[in-house]
Amino acid sequence: MTDIFVYYLPQFFDWVLKTSIMASIAVGLILIVKTLLRNKLTSRWNYLLWMILIVRLLLPWSPDSSFSIYSILSYGYKTIISFQTQPEDNLNKERIHVTTAIHSNKNMEKEHYAAVSQQKMAKESNDIISNKAIVSDEKQKNTPISFHTIILYIWLIGVFALSLTTYCINRRLYNFIKKQPVITDKRITDIFENCKKTMSVQNSIPIVLAGKISSPTVLGFFRPRVLLSRELINQLTDPQLRHIFYHELAHIKRRDVGVNWIMHSLLIINWFNPILWFAYFCMRDDQELACDAYALTFMEEEEKISYGHTIISLLEHFSNFYQAPGLANLSRNKKNIKRRIFMIKKFQKKSHKGSAISVIAVIAVSSLTLLNAHADGSNGKTKEQTSSEKVATNEIKKEKFKIHITAEEQNMIENSNVQSGFFQQENGTGFFFYKSK
């Protein structure tokens, strides 16, 4: 069991690192699309973009594509690297050709020393075999822990610490709510049941006093309950309570608490990536806008303004930002408040133009981010050469072959050819010889 853990854990950690990098690139693309299409994406599709990020973090494997954004970025990186290293590669290839020519002219010398070399190698191999066990034992004792292993242990500590913290916070919250009484006020329950009927919610959902949590909140995914503080019950009017219930029931129907748990669990695994934490908070803000849009579909047109006033009143007087994965509550981000009011003011139940643009944006982002980089780069284009390019390359190599031979290498070639009966031409360059008759 320990061997399996030691073998598979580094592989899983490498996959986490790779996936985290790709997810960070996906976050950047999502933010760019959201910025460019700021006033054209509908709220629900705007929130759906973050579901692409969750899928990217969950995918253990995806097909390769040259149209992936990772292929585009890797191809650009490889192009820069190959451009920088091309002169050095050409020089190394030319050196190989020169060395091959020298070795081909020294066959007689190699045959002369072959027997001596074999005896020497046999002796050295015997020494290596005799000392192999001692050297391996010393290496095992003196080998330090690799940097990769240290980072792996740090990551594990972070995962365990954050998991324990999340468990303790939510366990304490659930235990606190269990002690709170269920609201049975007929005025409250009648409004709530009418909202459930309008939104076709069949599940039994209790309304519980929230205690110290002042803002209206949904708690739990499998057995959800709506939390309401006593201050809200005493101060809000019936229409305001109806707006709140529409909003909280929208969270339940959209299963936002489950999405929050999935994203938070992925954050625990990728706790070292601040880009994903930033994306999580942006997702929670967009979640509220999408929930507002869904709640507004069950209201009359003239109720939009009063719904906006209810949201502003809640954010100003009753909102305490207690963000936990098991809760779906209001956001106190001032920038997000302006976005919510603007969305509520401009909301239209049927916006075909906005929906079409949103669908295109989601499909485009999915195609670019959910496919892995192509293994050969850009369809193997870097491996293809035309006949004219090959001719030009060969001509350059011939010219550089003459230039990059050192004086010592030239002398070795000349001496080897003289021993074989070849003599240098007069006024020659040192590369052309004739056979003595």
Image (spheres, rainbow, N blue to C red):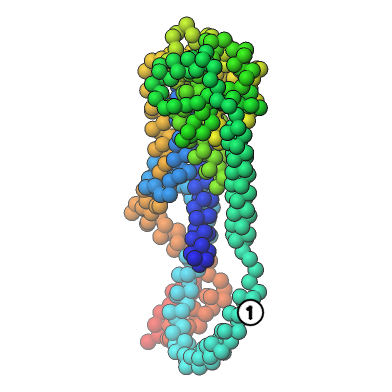
The residue located at (44%, 84%) in the rendering is: 107
Q: Is residue 409 above or below residue 320?
A: below
Q: Tell me where residue 96 appears, x and y as whole percent.
A: 47, 70
Quadrant in which residue 166 is drawn: top right
Q: Left of 246 or right of it: where is 181?
A: right
Mark 1: few/some/many CA within 10 Å (<14, 14-19, 20+):
few
Name the one closer to the observer, 152 or 165.
165
Q: Tell me where residue 351 appears, x and y as whole percent.
A: 39, 16
Q: Is residue 360 visible?
A: yes
**Which quarter of the figure is the C terminus placed in?**
bottom left
Name the one closer to the observer, 29 or 303.
303
Q: In this view, does 273 lie above or below 420?
A: above
Q: Is residue 142 above or below residue 230?
A: below
Which residue, as the protein is rendered here, is positioned at the far top? 302
Which amino acid type corresponds to the residue marked 1 in the rendered image?
Answer: Glu
Judging by the rendered image, the residue that carries numbered circle 1 is 138
Q: Left of 63 or right of it: where is 264?
A: right
Name the one closer to the observer, 20 or 236.
236
Q: Tell me where residue 83 appears, x and y as whole percent.
A: 51, 51
Quadrant in which residue 280 is drawn: top right
Q: In this view, does 268 lie above or below 34?
A: below
Q: What element carries label 1?
A: helix
Which residue, as the protein is rendered here, is positioned at the far left? 387
Q: Tell me where residue 420 appears, x and y as whole percent.
A: 43, 86
